[in-house]
Amino acid sequence: MKKLILLVLVVFVAGCGDPNYVEPTAQPSEINYSEETAAKNAERTLQIASGGLVPSPEDFIALDVAPIIEGVSSPDGMINTGDSVVWLILVEEARTSASGLSVLKVHRRIGSVSSESL
């Protein structure tokens, strides 16, 4: 009986993950963002993090960039103020770079969409 309860608990916990989470692949790539795009993404993540907007599945793919681990975006399946901070950093990088773009190293995600399309 104890084994059955343990098995049911393991199956239940395994099925409780975020349905919008998309597992990243191992190879990071670089995505360039303009100051305007990064600012729009920062604003949207703040609206979502504060409860003002309900995120869509596309939002999770395009806006979930935090935490940054060893210089690479490592999405955690949540859109929160950590993501907003990363987007604000990207705004500043784009503003001060010679190309006018900021670069974010990300793990490619299956079905990812460009934040330009949001």
Image (tube, grey):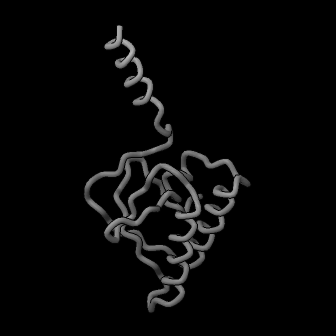
The number of numbered discs placed on residues in the rendered structure image is 0
Q: Residue furthest left?
A: 27
Left/right placement of residue 109 relative to residue 83 reads left
Relative vertical location of residue 94 with respect to residue 84 in this rendering, above or below: below
Q: Residue at x 36, y 19 (%)?
A: 6
Relative vertical location of residue 111 with respect to residue 114 in this rendering, above or below: above
Q: Percent from the top left, x then y, of residue 19? A: 50, 37
Left/right placement of residue 3 relative to residue 100 reads left
Q: Percent from the top left, x then y, of residue 47? A: 69, 60
Q: Residue at x 46, y 62 (%)?
A: 66
Relative vertical location of residue 25 with respect to residue 8 in this rendering, above or below: below
Q: Residue furthest top?
A: 1
Residue in front for this viewpoint, 3 or 77 = 3
Q: Residue furthest front?
A: 2
Left/right placement of residue 108 relative to residue 43 reads left
Quarter of image, res 102: bottom left
Q: Percent from the top left, x then y, of residue 76? A: 44, 52
Q: Residue at x 31, y 69 (%)?
A: 70
Residue in front for this viewpoint, 80 or 103 = 80
Residue in front for this viewpoint, 8 or 30 = 8
Q: Residue at x 35, y 56 (%)?
A: 108
Relative vertical location of residue 75 with respect to residue 11 in this rendering, above or below: below
Q: Quadrant of the C terminus?
A: bottom right
Q: Quadrant of the N terminus?
A: top left
Q: Percent from the top left, x then y, of residue 115? A: 53, 61
